[in-house]
Amino acid sequence: MPKISREMFDEFMVPTYSPGQQIPVRGEGSRLWDQEGREYVDFAGGIAVSGLGHVHPVLVAALTEQAGKLWHVSNLLANEPAISLARKLCEATFAERVFLCNSGGEANEAALKLVRRYAYDHHGAEKDEIIAFEQGFHGRTLFTVSVGGQANYREGFGPLPGAITHLPFNDVGALEEAFSSRTCAVMVEAIQGEGGVRDANPEFLEAIRRLCDTHDALMIMDEVQTGVGRTGYLYAYQAYQVIPDILTTAKALGGGFPVAAMLCRAEVGKSLGIGTHGSTYGGNALACAVAGAALDLINTPEVLNGVEERRQRIVAGLEEIDARQGMGLFSEIRGRGLLMGCVLREHWAGRAREFLNAAQAEGLLLLVAGADVIRMAPSLVIPSEDIDEGLARFARAVESVVASN
């Protein structure tokens, strides 16, 4: 067997991704090591997935214990870890019913199918409009990419599902004007992650809830990226005091193991009756055992309260880095908790990826959210020393970009 190389990726993989030249082979906490033994501080978290860092011993124990018992039985039979995970999710949220699947895209697909089916069951086929928002992101299936508000992700994949209306994010007036008796659902992110880490205004979410109630429509909260402690709340809706009818969750739910869920009220969930939807691997015993352990760890005051403390430490470091630049680097730092969007000032607009690449060269992993926003989503339990080391490496990366300007 030849040594695995980055060149082999280009040789054998469909060119959907363009990963960096490094290949990580080992992780521990908030550090990664590549094939050459080089160490990285991880402020990316696998795109907000590694909520407890890498190779957390409690998750490893849950996985290995379950691996010695039972892996997969399909949805023809129930399994204990899946039932346990569903119970925990219901007890921790507004939800009364759960559909388990494998990814955020699948959870959102299930939510979108559910709202159409619920409207069909209760109001008839003519109530089919789904309202969503510009720059929103909900997945890569044909339905979710159609509901997502970024046209470049839809281009070339038509014909697309219809009866979908896109409105400006945070625009209550446009929302009120668009709503009608034909509207069956609104899908919204509490924070638009891929769309630039843009926070929903409280009055905007309150308007969605009010209008859904008025027009017999359902509110879907996409918490794939904001859920499972990322904002300092188990789910971000809890910070807004706005309760959706349906919530989707993935990413940090499994701490790196593929698992997702759609949560809903019992009355709504009735419309996904026997045979209406399914997932071969959904509710997999291995995934649910890991997710149950991750949820138990994260849904504690120690972890959730620590999220804001870590944010403040990172923000203070970023402000110090920003102050060193004569014309400044960031116009604002958006988001909640440890989902952070550092918006580049006009002078640096369009150059977020340059900072990402420079950070990688210094041994720091970052994300972007569009061309103008540097995104950070580190572990919810990242130690102070890793925060400080990551900020030091980012400072050097900034200096290198500035020096080359």
Image (cartoon, rainbow, N blue to C red):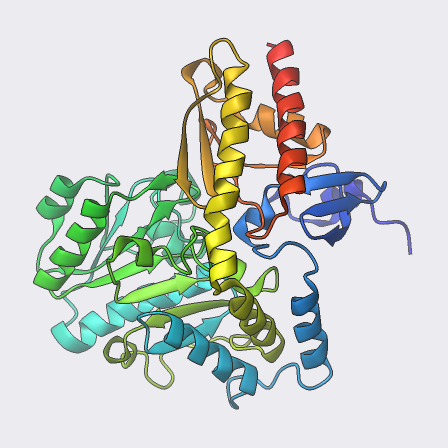
Q: Give coordinates of residue 356: x percent, y percent.
A: 60, 30
Residue 133 visible in the snapshot? yes
Up the image or down, 394 lies above or below 218; here it is above
Up the image or down, 367 lies above or below 262; here it is above
Q: Examine the image and state in which quarter residue 43 appears.
A: top right
**Which residue in the rendered view is the most extreme toward the right?**
1
**Left or right: 180 with respect to 241?**
left
Quarter of the image containing the N terminus?
A: bottom right
Residue situated in front as seen by the camera: 59 or 303: 303
**Left or right: 310 with respect to 345?**
right
Residue at 60 percent across and 13 percent down: it is: 402
Residue at 17 percent across and 69 percent down: it is: 125
Q: Give coordinates of residue 293: x percent, y percent.
A: 58, 71
**Left or right: 11 with respect to 347?**
right
Residue 368 visible in the snapshot? no
Quarter of the image containing the C terminus?
A: top right
Residue at 33 percent across and 52 percent down: it is: 147
Residue at 46 percent across and 46 percent down: it is: 308
Q: Give coordinates of residue 116: x percent, y percent.
A: 25, 67
